[in-house]
Image: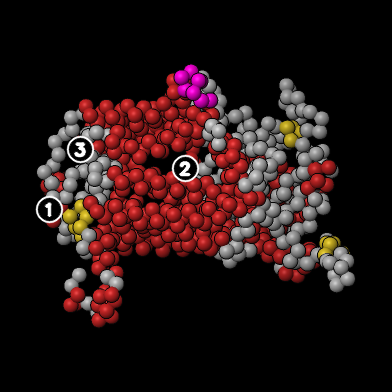
Amino acid sequence: MNIIKTFIPTLALFSAVFASHTTLASGETPRAPKQEWSFNGLFGTYDRASAQRGFQVYKEVCSGCHGMNLLSYRHLTGIGFSKAEIKAIAATVEVQDGPDGEGDMFDRLGMPADRFLSPFPNVQAAAAANGGKAPPDLSLMTKARIGGSDYVYGLLTGYSDAPAGIEIPEGGNYNKYYPGHVISMAAPLDDEAVEYTDGTKPTLSQHAKDVTTFLAWAAEPEMEDRKRMGIKVLLFLLILTGMLYAVKRKVWEDLH
Amino acid sequence: MDTNKMHPIIKWVEYRLPIFSFIDHSLGSQYPTPKNLNYWWNFGSLLGLVLVIMIISGITLSMHYTAHVDLAFNSVERIMRDVNYGWLIRYIHMNGASMFFIAVYVHIFRGLYFGSFKAPREILWMIGIFILLAMMASAFMGYVLVWGQMSFWGATVITNLFSAIPLFGDSIVTLLWGGFSVDNPTLNRFFSLHYLFPFVIVGLVVLHIWALHVHGSNNPTGIDVKSDQDTASFHPYFTTKDLFGMGLFMTFFMFFVFYAPNFFGEPDNYIPADAMVTPPHIVPEWYFLPYYAILRAFTGDFLVYQVISLGGFLMDAKLAGVLAMFASILLLLFLPWLDGSKVRSCRFRPIMAMAFWVFFLDCLVLGYIGGKPADGIFIPIGQFATFYYFAHLLLIVPLVSRLERPKSLPESINASVLKAAE
């Protein structure tokens, strides 16, 4: 018990000293505000309708520049598309296959097993078409940025005219949440950027929310399985630990 | 073990290979253990558990991993997405590394507080330090295998440190890389060594436990076992206690695996390695942050550097930083002699106990500074914390341990237990 008694004040002192420094150190780019996501929390799941609309946003807007090379069309069952729908989605693209028996490459319609078609044949072409820097792949975007989904949503909705005093260089755009504020991607979404078929109101924030949900699923397609299994594992461990404690108590009873 | 009560088959085996009595003497009823061990003593068995989990999950991952610069990152993502329960195995392995270091740091600080490193357990302690070094090498190389941005740039920064060594530095770096930059040969040798090191650790652990069993566990009072009254047999007392600890620890571990699997990680490592783009802040994994802070504390104007290099004459600041970083761990090898007190436990050494907590706090400060960019207020704080780290080991411990008059010790472990129960 002695250790605990000394430890707690030590820890308190530590956090008090450093709480003051963290506020000092947080840079000038603000953190994107937290959003209510369907996939937050211990029981969170991906809102299927939102993720499907998000896929539509990706397909009609983002995929013009950004690939998602870790995903195959068949993975889309994860957000509730049926096998037939996926077949139809895959068949909207043409992919190169081969070589065939004659040694020639040939084009064919996409199949569910194909990876998402990339907008550019290679990184060099992507960079050349985008002012020297290839647009990043979006497969892991919500995992690969500090702030995750909140950051992606903040970025998509964070465009505005630059405040007075901030110089935006040629080809740059002002974004509140992008580190350094100058981003080369122009505002990709707007009200009515995409026409929804399910009657959802096509606002900028709705588009951003939907596509972020889709990207969050794409980055962590295992999340629902993970959380479902986690509940069972933790319950099992808690009960087991309780029982082990009872055993330990019983065994030690005669010793003290 | 009473051979007459044995099952005939067990008796047959025992006669030829006395493995049952060996187990009984190591973990069973024939291994007397101080009965006053508190829960800080659970971390040894927890470390054994994590080591086994890491080896099993690691061997499974290696069945699906491809050690090639063009394929490594995507092969990890393939494990996450397409291999059955691959995400589970990978998250166990990834968080297991953090659990390993949490447990080992608790284990080490427990040894420091209760004087477990002191005679006659010096070699036991020193083997422990070598296990820590092997764990660090393993963890570092494992992190590189993912081949994300932080993998690549972490590998570049850390391997480059060796270039500070006079005369041979550049040749050593070339050897580590297998070429002239961190590239495919580097990834291949790191994979090979990452597979090897855990078994080196297993070997060291065998020696560690062997040395432990010679004199048995230290205990919170730090006094020697004097009679049977002071001890309880390992089985069933400590087997049940360790199992309970394992239940708690696994609950903690699995919470992260299932609900915050990337809590300990850096988002940048989900960006594939790119030799052309340097991340804005290169930070190592959390368990390396204190050493990283010590490394970076050594700038040209750091007073400690000026003194040890005789005003910059002996070595440049980079070499001093590298030496200090290694010294921060290697100095611990000499701790049994730096600490001259006959009394082990800080329970009876109030001044040393205070120094211990300040040292512990200092390590937390170093860890915090290691994760911050090297500018502004963070530089002098990091430098002071670095100075204090070495001052603790080289000045405070030798002096306090020799000058402090410890409180009077209890007559026996049993007496202290009875007194606490009153």
Callout 3, which amino acid?
Val
Q: A203 and A28: which one is in front?
A: A28
Decide if residue B228 is in sight here.
Answer: yes
Residue B240 image position (x, y, % from top left): 28, 61
Q: Secondary structure at mark 3?
A: loop
Residue under label 2, please give it.
Answer: B287
In the image, which is nearer the foreground, mark 2 or mark 3? 3
Determine contact: label 2, label 1, CB under 8 Å. Answer: no
What secondary structure characterizes most of the magenta part?
A: loop
Residue under label 3, please give it.
Answer: B343
Marks 2 and 1, how far apart at CA: 41 Å
Q: Where are the magenta residues, as a range?
A: B309-316
Numbered disc 2: what chain? B
Which numbered circle lies on residue B227?
A: 1
Numbered disc 1: what chain? B
- Relative side of B279 to A118, left or right: left
Q: B19 and A240: which one is in front?
A: B19
Residue A18 image position (x, y, % from top left): 45, 30
Q: Earlier in the sequence, mark 2 or mark 3?
A: 2
Q: Which quadrant is the N terminus of chain B positioned in?
A: bottom left
Q: Are marks 3 and 1 on the same chain?
A: yes
